[in-house]
Image (cartoon, rainbow, N blue to C red):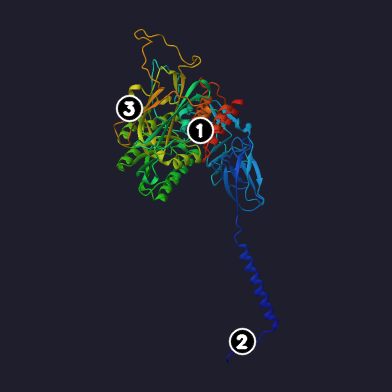
Amino acid sequence: TLFYGIKDEPASYYKKKNNMKQLISIILLTLLVAGTPPPTSIKITGTVYSDDDKQGLPGVNILIKGTTTGVVTDFEGSYTIEVPREGVTLIFSSIGFVTKKVTVSNKKVIDVFLQSDVMELSEVVVTGTAAEVRREMTGSVTHRTRKKGKNKSVYSQGYHDYEHQPIQHNTEAYAAINENIFLEPRKQPLSTFSIDVDAASYSNMRRFLEQGQAPPIDAVRIEEMINYFNYDYQQPSNENPFSVHTELSSAPWNDDHYLLHIGLQGKKIPMDNLPASNLVFLIDVSGSMDSPNKLGLLKSAFKLLTNQLRSQDKVSIVVYAGAAGVVLPPTNGHRQQAILGALQKLQAGGSTAGGAGIKLAYKIAQEQFIDGGNNRVILATDGDFNIGASSDGEMQRLIEKERNQGVFLTVLGFGMGNYKDSKMEILANKGNGNYAYIDTILEAKKVLVNEFGGTLFTIAKDVKLQIEFNPAEVKGYRLIGYENRLLQDEDFNDDKKDAGELGSGHTVTALYEIIPQNGKRGSKYLKSIDDLKYQDKNTAIRESSDLLTLKLRYKQPVGTRSQLIEHVVSPEVTSLDQTSNNFRWSAAVAGFGMLLRDSEFKGKTTYQKVEQWAQSARGEDYEGYRAEFIRLVRTGELLVKN
């Protein structure tokens, strides 16, 4: 009875039972193996170079063939990408270069050299005034137009292919620029202008060249091209917020002329010491912003800015389309997920009530005002205001009023086709702020991360320069660029007159071309003026060995009275090959700007000479901006030849 219910079984029963156990084990093992994740992917690193100059290429697209996974090279041309296995093919492509395919073998480092593609650079479709390049690079978003029936829509890690859109009429607007001419110091001894740290013209010019087009002449502002780059000036050693540096040599494009280089270096304030920020993001979500290189790129740019915020900072987000509204009330900077979430939900559509949006943004900025802090509206738009307070005059008066109450304005431009550069430049100038054009995510990083302090934190406002030339030493002079920053001579001492702002760590560079009085021959550039009836042209000149005297006026960020700095420049000339990299680099950029504008003052400047000057002054180029400039010079030359 103890073993009740158990009975003897034949041997075949146990054999079948063991076979069943083995079968179950095999099935379980098979399922386990099937559920095991694939081997770890292979990490490939390397650098993409230009085959022409063996320099690293930034912004190259690297795509795993047959997938939508890819990366973009950094400023040095370096990249890192994970591939699932050996044997896959990587596709390397960039505007102006022949696409290259490379199969991944057992190598973990793959360097690639791309050859220039002249045909691609000039492949533009033109209809009336509209021009559209068949391939348009927009930083983290790349568009490729394919033949009908072979296109597909995908999105992964910043890549997006889309159906070819109808060509839109080009309504971009730029303020006319009448290039500065040579003036005689006997009749006009003073030259007065406001500083300019904006760099929008450079990135906008780059956008045109990368699309295979020469930029419109009025889109080329030489001073903004020069000031796109940082220069190696010494930090101020006294109580002034900036230091002053001058250098005099022969003009590279005219041996009979001098070139005067003026550099200002703003005091760099450590991030931890910067005042608290009260920022209002004012974002255009109208229908004109509905494209990847506008609202899509805008979101990515503001995400980079959000990552720089601190707990003492606060952010509000205002949007405008058919009407204006608040999508994020004032939020502490450490709540980055809330800020990023609000940005991610933005969608474009409707008309453009820009005036209403600006008014609402300033209202919130005043309500959240931080005494002694950085109170600023950051406007992001393509500039296409068309409803409400849309006239330039009305916008100016509104922004000037708010500026005087301590709220400054930064303007970030996006997009193309309907881009309103002239309007955005006016708004930034009147708002005690700066203006940048964001054409790629790398440009967004430069403006909002690398130059965060300079872009958003003002250390000196209403900075003006006035130069008095000595007629005994100077026969003629001209200011290179700054045409829309010129001031009346009497404006220099007028503290009510608005001028430019200098941010933390920012540099400002200006160039004068000078005709010396003791030159070998007269200049064809000096225009004749009739002798004056009531003044003697031989009026005595005070004896002095100075070439000129440079005066600067500036105010503290919250000050109302200006302070004066004076700096005397002697006529001692340094040979061109002994000048600093700062001098030669600024001269190269100015020469390129004169070529793009087809300036009557370009002298013997050529694209080859500009490249030579730039190569000799490239210096330390950690971010690759100067290497990129040299490639743009080559692109400009190719466009001229073709």
Q: CA distance from mark 3 to mark 2?
A: 109 Å
Disc 1: which residue: 581
Q: Residue at x 41, y 9 (%)?
A: 530
Tag 1: amino acid = Asn
SS label for mark 1: helix
Residue under the image location 53 percent in, 44 percent down: 158
Q: Report if residue 416 is visible in the image.
A: no
Between residues 625 and 320, which one lies in front from this camera angle?
625
The residue that mark 2 highlights is 6
Mark 1 to mark 3: distance in Å?
Answer: 34 Å
Marks 2 and 1, the one that precedes in the sequence: 2
Q: Quadrant of residue 120?
A: top right
Residue 42 visible in image: yes
Q: Amino acid at mark 3?
A: Lys
Residue furthest to the top: 533
- Viewer-nearest of labels 2 and 1? 1
Could you tell me if the residues under marks 3 and 2 are in contact, i.e. CB atoms within 8 Å?
A: no
Provide residue 379's location: percent of width, then percent of height. 40, 37
Figure label count? 3
Residue position marked by numbered label 3 in the rendering: 497
User: In this rendering, is residue 7 above or below 278?
Assistant: below
In the picture shown, does residue 273 fall above or below 403?
Answer: below
Earlier-in-chain disc, 3 versus 2: 2
Pointers 1 and 3 in contact (C-beta within 8 Å): no
Q: Position of residue 506 (x, y in %)?
A: 42, 36
